Amino acid sequence: MKWVDDTLQILEEVQNFHHKLLDILHTFTSAQLERQILMQNQMRERQMAMQIAWTREFLKYFEVFFGLAAVGLTAGAIKKKKPGLFLPMVPLSFILAYQYDMGYGTLLQRMKGEAENILDTEKTLLEMPKGALTFENLEKARRAQSKFFIEK
């Protein structure tokens, strides 16, 4: 019964080949996932760097505006003897402090800490309305949309 032995040997080789293919596929998908995670992290880092750079650039212009406003409002308040003219400096100083803290201070570290706290202790705040998206929900919506466009 050589043909039975040959068939069994072929089946065993096919099974071995199948396992090798699965290993290769697993390695490939793992590498692809790792690349995607790295790419997303690099994109996030670049976006954050751009946000910080924008804040620092905005701060340069706002500092000039704040300085001119402070001199002008102080001079006007002294000249007209109306201290109320100096009042707009209060909210402007809060804006300046916030922008400085965002660009050069520890605001981002404090925000990161608070975000980590929310992720650790307040997970329910992060839940999506009606739960997370599923493939079935997306397919149902796609089919409904396809029928909608076809019927037109």
Image: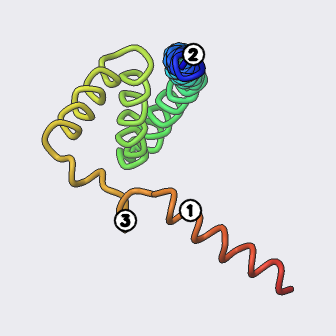
Say few, some or many: other residues with alpha carbon within 10 Å of mark 1 (under 14 / 14 to 19 / 20 or more): few
User: Quadrant of the rendered structure where residue 152 is?
Assistant: bottom right
Comparing 37 with 65, the one in front is 37
* Residue 75 location (% of width, % of height): 48, 32
Return the residue found at the far left.
121
Q: Earlier in the sequence, mark 1 or mark 2?
A: 2
| Residue corresponding to mark 2 | 2
- Indicate which disc residue 138 carries: 1
Viewer-nearest of discs 1 and 2: 2
Report the residue at 66% width, 77% height from top. 144
SS at circle 3: loop
Comparing 89 with 22, the one in front is 22
- Indicate which disc residue 129 carries: 3
- Tag count in the figure? 3
Task: Give the left or right position of residue 18, taking residue 90 as reference.
Answer: right
Report the residue at 18% width, 34% height from top. 117
Comparing 83 with 110, the one in front is 110
How far separated are the C-alphas under marks 2 and 3?
64 Å
Indicate the amino acid at tag 2.
Lys
